[in-house]
Image (cartoon, grey):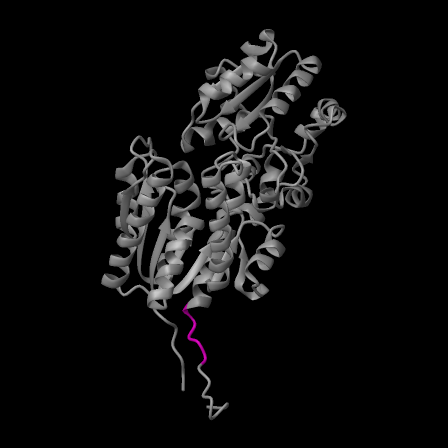
Amino acid sequence: MPTTTKKLRVLFITYDGLLDPLGQSQVLPYVMAVREICETLHIVSFEKKHNKFSCVSTTTSLSTAKIAWTPLNFTKRYGVIGKLYDAVKMFYCTLLILRKEDVNLVHARSHPPAQIAALLKWIYGVKFIFDFRGLWVDERVEKGGWNLAHALDRFQFRANKFLEKKILSFSDHVVVLTEAVVPEVRRLGSLEQSRFSTIPCCADFDHYKIPTASQISLTRRSLGIAENALVLGYLGSVGGMYRSDRFFKCIEYVSEFYTQSRVLALTPDTGVFNALAKKYLDKSLHANIVVMHADREKVAEYLPVMNILLSFVKEGYARSSMSPTKLAEALACGVPFISSPGVGDVEDILRKVDGGYIIDPDDDSALAWFCQNIPEIIKLGGSHLRLKAEPILGLGLARQKYRQVYRDLAQPELSVSKNNPDG
């Protein structure tokens, strides 16, 4: 008897907001990519009240694509109670949508939504994609969110590690960000390789481009940066797992080699970054720092101003699962990348595209080597770097892989009679 592909009626759950920068770059493009495969698609997200992204434009884009969206309020206060309140909201909201729209596939982005999705699968038997993202439970400890010296945090850690294993084994498909973490996730969930897909954090290469030399000069002037200055970049949040102390130590080394060196930091944590600069840098270097809060549009404009982007991360168990979005964005702009060791697949990617180096930020001789080789590192950048990076970090790759995951889950399952193996 011929079989037909199942019509997918999808519920997508994310605790990140669609209006967040992350939602704009790492959620919306992928959801749009799979829409054509789905009969219906409904997103549930948690939005922050003071978000600077335009809700109107996002609503219009989703409406045009015929994607339903239920934004819930993200609870920022009240600690554990606030998170439990969000979990209850998430469950009841998704339960109502699942029943009303006869959902047959739940796609959960990260651990908290996956806990709800697993519960929905247990109750209704729907298919379940666990978009694992990273070793979230361990990251909570390594970033300082949970202190295992405290009984309540220790309980949360153990409970969530137990749930992580159960949910992994219960999922129909698991999406991870790096090849480096696959063996560990397979071990945690006792999963076969066929239930995995590795989809790194990709960048929209149509959004992040390489401007002309005159455009870069104009942007530099608008920032008060000389056209011939060496510009080292910082992109993203501050604190937690990032080694700000060693970043600024590197800046001090560079200033000894290059009197015209500048730092351009694009971060939502401008106040924290400035405070750390004052703490770790000599007062004479403070004027060399340009710090800006930049939305996604401004990041695309200012990132190409950098000669090299630096990213120093604390060592830790969870680093193997990390896929920095900033890596894809930098390479899309033709900007070489310097990273600390042990971060997901970064070393392998940089080797493939010849787009930068791994250096140990705690090794002063490695920082000195970096300073001495800056001219050669800068030569790695440009349009040739962008061309090599797009096939492995471009949005097209992520779209293709997510579509394949959905198509595989839309295939009918083969039912085999116990009395007639050939039937």
Q: Is residue 78 magenta?
A: no
Q: Main secondary structure of the magenta part?
A: loop
The image position of residue 289, as x and y in percent, is: 54, 15
Q: Could you tell me which residue is drawn at 50 percent across and 90 percent down? A: 421
Report if residue 410 is visible in the image: yes
| Looking at the image, residue 403 lies above or below residue 80 | below
Report if residue 218 is visible in the image: no
Q: Camera-side residue: 29 or 140?
A: 140
Q: Camera-side residue: 415 or 336?
A: 415
Q: Could you tell me which residue is drawn at 37 percent across and 60 percent down? A: 119
| Looking at the image, residue 128 lies above or below residue 288 | below
Relative placement, left or right, of 105 versus 275 is: left
Q: Quadrant of residue 248?
A: top right
| Looking at the image, residue 243 lies above or below residue 14 | above
The image position of residue 133, as x and y in percent, is: 50, 48
The image position of residue 86, as x and y in percent, is: 32, 44
The image position of residue 268, as x and y in percent, is: 43, 27
Stretch in magenta: 410-414
